[in-house]
Image (cartoon, rainbow, N blue to C red):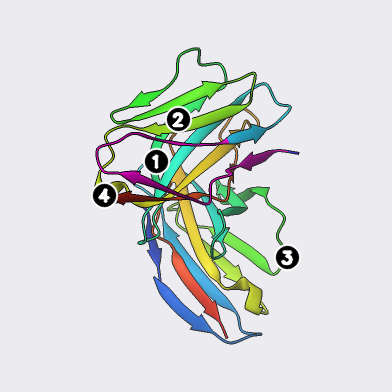
Amino acid sequence: AQKITQTQPGMFVQEKEAVTLDCTYDTSDQSYGLFWYKQPSSGEMIFLIYQGSYDEQNATEGRYSLNFQKARKSANLVISASQLGDSAMYFCAMRLNYGGSQGNLIFGKGTKLSVKP
Amino acid sequence: DAGVTQSPTHLIKTRGQQVTLRCSPKSGHDTVSWYQQALGQGPQFIFQYYEEEERQRGNFPDRFSGHQFPNYSSELNVNALLLGDSALYLCASSLATGANYGYTFGSGTRLTVV
């Protein structure tokens, strides 16, 4: 069964330091995509970063990078130089292909990140 | 360029009632997906609409139904509301032939069933 596991319910990080949020996934499909979203208290899911299963290089988007280890089925999010505005819930998600077009997203339970001044 | 718009933002309903939630997709998007997010959980996929038809469906009972209109906007209907239906309902739009990461989410409708 397809599943996303986030084992850290909550994390604390000092402002300006880096933090890693863990994510492992389970699928027997060869083609899939992995996402990280940020959800502030307002509720909106904000896209952070994407990694395709066939991408050989780890994805990076500004202060966000994704540490993709395919053999271990892990897709950890690294946030560098944390800012107070990074405090939010973070969700890892997986998309399986569906007829060649976009399939639905499977989400983990999330990690609540708190950035301390 | 407007993103995804959901209405209403909050509502309170009584058990057994019916509710309709609305979603306007991002300009240029043609696919709408609905997710239910219970408190403290990640979102769970309800269904996806494309070309006015339900294309995929998650593990939700028939009490949950939807519709997509010619202008790509969508409605989520829930009949015979249960206390357990209390959640944040998120709408996400995308382009069927678009980039792999082309999902845009709205801010959600927070439904409370009493």
The answer to whether residue A89 is magenta is: no
The amino acid type, in three-letter code, at marker 3 is: Asp
Which numbered dot is residue A50? 2
Q: Quadrant of residue A72?
A: top right
Which mark's residue is nearer the viewer, 3 or 1? 1
**C-alpha distance separating marks 4 and 3:** 40 Å
Q: Mark 1 sits on what residue?
A: A47
Instruction: Say which chain tag 3 marks.
Output: B
CB under 8 Å between callouts 1 and 2? yes
Residue B3, given in percent of the width and then of the height, sits at: 32, 50
**Foreground: disc 4 or disc 3:** 4
Q: Which residues make up the magenta segment?
A: A2-23
Measuring from the top left, give residue B114's x and y in whole percent: 57, 86
Image disc number at residue B62: 3
State if disc 4 and disc 2 touch (CB < 8 Å).
no
Q: Which residue is mark 4?
A: A85
Q: Type of residue at label 1?
A: Phe
First in residue order: circle 2 vs circle 4: 2
Depth order, front residue of B32/A107: A107
Gap in Å between the C-alphas at discs 4 and 1? 15 Å
Disc 4: host chain: A
Q: Secondary structure at mark 2?
A: strand
Are the residues under badges 1 and 2 in a single subunit?
A: yes
